[in-house]
Image (spheres, rainbow, N blue to C red):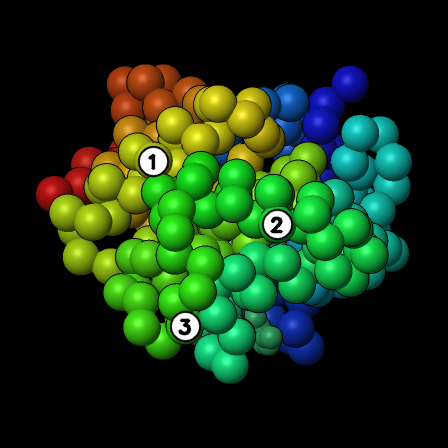
Amino acid sequence: MARLTIKSVSKSFGTSHAVRDVSLHVEDAELVCLLGPSGSGKSTLLRMIGGFEAPTAGSILIDGKDVTAMPPERRPTGMVFQSHALWTHMDVFNNIAFGLRLRRLPKAEIEERVEQALTLVGLTDYGKRMTTQLSGGQQQRVALARSLVLEPKILLLDEPFASLDQHLRERLREEVRDIQQRLGITTLFVTHGQDEALALADRIVVMRDGCTEQIAPPDRIYREPQTEFVAGFIGSMN
Ligand code: ADP
Ligand code: MG
């Protein structure tokens, strides 16, 4: 059974069709990149999987269970946004511990899991820092740790490193790949960068105007683009 099943999902905002009849299966431990230009519906699709947006039509299943009407906090998903998602009035430890406290876990377990999560993202000993003292890259590491500490079945990353410089972005995406493989966590990674998708993904979903243009592994997308749009978009890579 697929970890994630998206069945004919659409989303309209008034007369604007953000996502049109998208279907997709994602296997356990797969890393799938949603790739497309700005406005192609990537974030809307991801937000529907996370439960932050309700589909206008279609359904979403996780491990065969229909979660279409389930609120975000009850879904086994964790989401990392591009930026501005950390609580600035809390230190790093409390940012990460917050969700565990809501689950009423014992204090010792919370401390252990937060430490593990910090180590996983390369921020051992950063617990007492305020998030405002961190660099952009470190803040995104904390956001990632905050999601991972809840042990989601599916990790949703919406252009998590887009605001960082090229060098840091490449380094962090390699770290994400490493963490993803070590944990074996099913991951959807949204990007508008062809190089990023080609470097990271087990499979790429190329999106255009709310539709999927092609769904295939990177080498096939690169060598056998199915549409002119895909060929042009991949070919425009710098
Ligand atoms: P992407 O992430 O690929 O840039 P989005 O999913 O953000 O694309 O947006 C897809 C389309 O849906 C765009 O035309 C955008 O303007 C529209 N859209 C997204 N969110 C909303 C919203 N909350 N209200 C109205 N239109 C929206
Ligand atoms: Mg977006």
Closer to the chain start, of discs 1 and 2, is 2
Instruction: From the viewer's perspective, tell me whether residue 164 is left or right of residue 112.
Output: left
Residue 82 x/y as whole percent:
42, 62
Foreground: disc 2 or disc 3: 2
- Image quarter (top left, top right, bottom left or bottom right) of the N terminus: top right
Residue sitting nearer the eye, 193 or 92: 92
Residue depth check, mark 1 versus mark 3: number of the one nearer the observer: 3
**What's under tag 1, amino acid-wise?**
Glu
Q: Tell me whether the residue at label 1 lies in contact with that at label 3, contact meaning CB atoms closer than 8 angstroms.
A: no
**For residue 15, which quarter of the picture?**
bottom right
Q: Amino acid at mark 2?
A: Glu
Q: Which residue is mark 2?
A: 111
> Which residue position holds label 1?
175
- Whether residue 90 is visible, yes or no, is yes
Secondary structure type for disc 3: loop
> In the rendered view, does 167 fall on the left or right side of 74?
left
Q: Is residue 58 above or below residue 84?
A: above
Q: Nearer the viewer, mark 1 or mark 2?
A: 2
Q: Earlier in the sequence, mark 2 or mark 3?
A: 2
Residue 24: percent from left, percent from top: 64, 33
Residue in view at x 19 percent, y 36 percent: 235
Q: Along the polypeptide, which appears first: circle 1 or circle 3?
A: 3
Q: Nearer the viewer, residue 172 or 67?
A: 172
Total number of numbered discs in the rendering: 3
Q: Nearer the viewer, residue 173 or 183?
A: 183
- Crowding near pointer 3: few (<14 within 10 Å), some, many (20+)? some
Q: Do labels 1 and 2 touch, CB within 8 Å?
A: no
Decide if residue 57 is in sight here: no
- In the rendered image, residue 145, in percent from the top left (x then y), is placed at 50, 49
Residue 6 sits above or below residue 1 on the image: below
Which element is circle 1 on? helix
Q: Which residue is mark 3?
A: 130
